[in-house]
Image: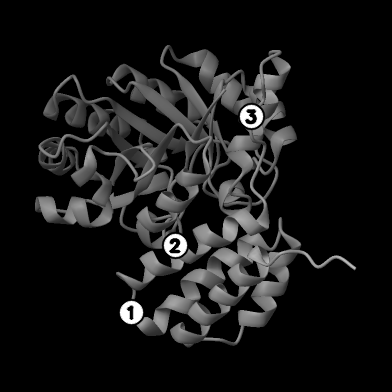
Amino acid sequence: MKILLAPMEGLLDYTLRDVLTRVGGVDRCVSEFIRITHRQLPARVFTRIVPELRHGSRTPAGVLVRPQLLGSDPACMADNAGVLASLYPEGIDLNFGCPAKTVNQHRGGAALLDEPELVGQIVAAVRRAVPLSIPVSAKMRLGNACDTRALECAQAIAEAGAAELVVHARTKAHGYRPPAYWERVREVRDAVTIPVIANGEIWNVADALRCREVTGCDTLMIGRGMVRNPGLALAIVAADRAAQGLAPGASGIAWADLLPLMTDFWRLVATHVEPRHRSGRLKQWLNYLRRHYAEAEQAFTELRLTNDPAGITAWLAAQRADANAPALHP
């Protein structure tokens, strides 16, 4: 089983990608979307959002990152894909799944799933604009307001030349409310000839195994589940290897081992986030982590009212010191 790390606008950017891919178990990442409107963006915009492009499209841990474009004009998307291709990305992903109102109101993301023909035109235009050595992939939801055109959209994407398709198992109207309709992903998979990757509502190993069983997809994309439990990909891979009679390897990451990575995350945040906003980034992540780690619940409580970066730096140092202190024996 392969695991892809999903993009999460406003949270899972290159800073958190760096940290989560160091834990292990992730085979590839997709970046947060780069919004394409009515002009050709300079190369520096792509490298600002996806700095891994300067390093062979890989995170510091060596995990591949595929930049993602979002837009509705085939010609403009193609022009910008051409600029992106000059930076030698691992591939180019196209977003047909974003449920954000601000994006949908401007005819982007999941709103395009009401127009399968346009979806196909966008994929075809991008495919023509970049060398064949650069894979073009896409991510979609099951639909906008409903899922009646899911198969039509998936087939349009496949026929236009996409190399693979990620399907989030909900419509835009469903948002992120459970359940995820994995059985519909199976229908999409059966309707196209390109690889389909399942996404949505994968929080633990049991969810991953059940998702694979229902969808028939051997590659899964995980976002919020990985942010909540950075060791989830490791745990899934370990369970899969054990089921095959292979040595499972590491099956997660303990809180004490996560603290150094959290410190690195904080240092990276300080390089590009204004001081008054830095604490919010760490607390945003802790708010996810506390659903998995009891220690994160305590950390979130202790830092909830702290906005001073120096105070958070000192708190992290104290936490690491406590974690590394030798146990006292009577």
Image x and y of residue 160, in percent: 28, 21
The quarter of the rendered structure image containing the N terminus is top right
Type of the residue with mark 1: Glu
| Cβ atoms at labels 1 and 3 below 8 Å apart | no
Image x and y of residue 5, in percent: 47, 41
* Helix, strand or loop status at disc 3: loop
Disc with the residue nearer the chain's start (1 vs 2): 2
For residue 249, the mark is 3
Determine which quarter of the picture holds residue 10: bottom left
Residue annotated with mark 1: 274
Give the residue at the far right of this rendering: 330
Residue annotated with mark 2: 264
Type of the residue with mark 3: Gly
Please state if 74 lies on the left or on the right of 16 as rendered: left
Q: CA distance from mark 1 to mark 3?
A: 39 Å
Determine which quarter of the picture holds residue 309: bottom left
Please state if 66 lies on the left or on the right of 89 as rendered: right
Q: Is residue 182 visible?
A: no
